Amino acid sequence: MFLNDFDFDLPEELIATRPASPRTSARLLVATANKVDDTTVSDLPKYLKPGDRLVFNDTKVIPARLNGVRNRLIDNDKLTSSNIEVTLLSLKKQGIWSALIKPLRKVKIGEKIFFDKNLQAKLTDKIDGQASLRFNIKGSELLKRLEDIGTMPLPPYIATKRRVDRRDNFDYQTVFARKLGSVAAPTASLHFDDALLGEIKNIGVDTSFVTLHVGAGTFLPVKDDDIKKHKMHAEYGEICQQTVEEINKTQKDGGRIIPVGTTALRLLESSALSDGTVRKWSGETDIFIYPGYKFKVADGLMTNFHLPKSTLIMLVSALMSKETIETIYDHAIKQKYRFFSYGDSSLLFPKKDRV
């Protein structure tokens, strides 16, 4: 199976740069193996059954983009300065953050970048176009500082079209975000508000939460023509005992497990036992799901529309079949659904409850 098998033509005007407002007014394509309905997210409860369980990712996006200054003394003690943009990618061991720096060539190993009078970081390494940074503060103190002065790390295809603004602090965060650690949002969950969550509960649909901290690697392209050679980036996640008990009970009672977003799905499948039950779990996952994968937990999936040649288009092709996804995406493009992080959504049910 090759990379070009997952390519398709997407008109640029269908790439959303702002979300629908209100959140639940986004369009929703509901698909089974044999039928496609065009509706809106506000109609989601009509497609759920009492006893179903939606599983959300409760990660919270770090305002991980920072503007700083690099100062340097040159001949005759003359001070020169350069403006530096930093996008944090992930926290590594010993308090070191991996980051993208623009322009990276303007900062030498050992030099400091100053973000304000209280926050600075030293460049400790450069590897494959990425930087390693050590901040002068760490832990919760650093995260609080980032919330004060950082901006949302919008995906590259949005950031190249417009500037990040304060509105994104709300738009690019789920209403139930609570565990700070992602540099990208679990975007399928952006369509939910408190009213919709209440309506879902009232019809007898249960909800559970897992945590997967989404890394910037989610935007990295697949470079190998043979997709089986692709190595996924690792992301940290955890499933608590309460969620384990809730999911396993729903399965035992015959309800459907429907992850909201590919991040929730990947974490559930990472934790699954051979009989389809899940276990308490924490650690990094680099699970790569592509056609031929046998799903153990997910009976469906709510997810936005994905990039051509991406690992996520491969994931939904594994769930629904490659041919079915091609039909669904052809329909979505003809009906002018909005794509990617701030775009519309889909609710996918495979032909069988479990593939």
Image: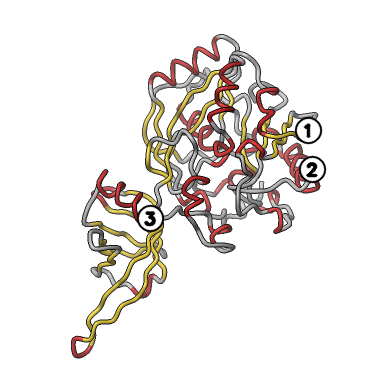
Residue at the left extreme, as displayed = 77
Write down the residue under mark 1: 36
The quarter of the picture where the C terminus appears is top right
Mark-to-mark CA distance, 2 and 1: 9 Å
Write down the residue under mark 2: 331
Q: Give the SS element for disc 1.
A: strand
Question: Which amino acid, by three-letter code, is at mark 2?
Answer: His
Question: Which amino acid, by three-letter code, is at mark 1?
Answer: Val
Q: Residue at x 58, y 55 (%)?
A: 224
Q: Answer whether labels 3 and 1 touch (C-beta < 8 Å).
A: no
Of marks 3 and 1, which one's residue comes earlier in the chain? 1
Question: Which amino acid, by three-letter code, is at mark 3?
Answer: Gly
**Placement of 82 over or under 86, stated as above or below:** below
- What number is the disc on residue 312? none
Q: Answer whether labels 3 and 2 touch (C-beta < 8 Å).
A: no
* Spot occupied by residue 67 in the image (x, y as percentages of width and height): 37, 64
Q: Residue at x 56, y 63 (%)?
A: 160
Would you call the spot at circle 2 few (<14 residues within 10 Å), some (14-19), or many (20 or more)? some
Of marks 3 and 2, which one's residue comes earlier in the chain? 3
Q: Is residue 192 toward the left or the right of residue 68 in the image?
A: right
Q: Give the SS element for disc 3.
A: loop
Q: Residue at x 58, y 18 (%)?
A: 205
Write down the residue under mark 3: 150
**Placement of 191 over or under 243, stated as above or below:** below
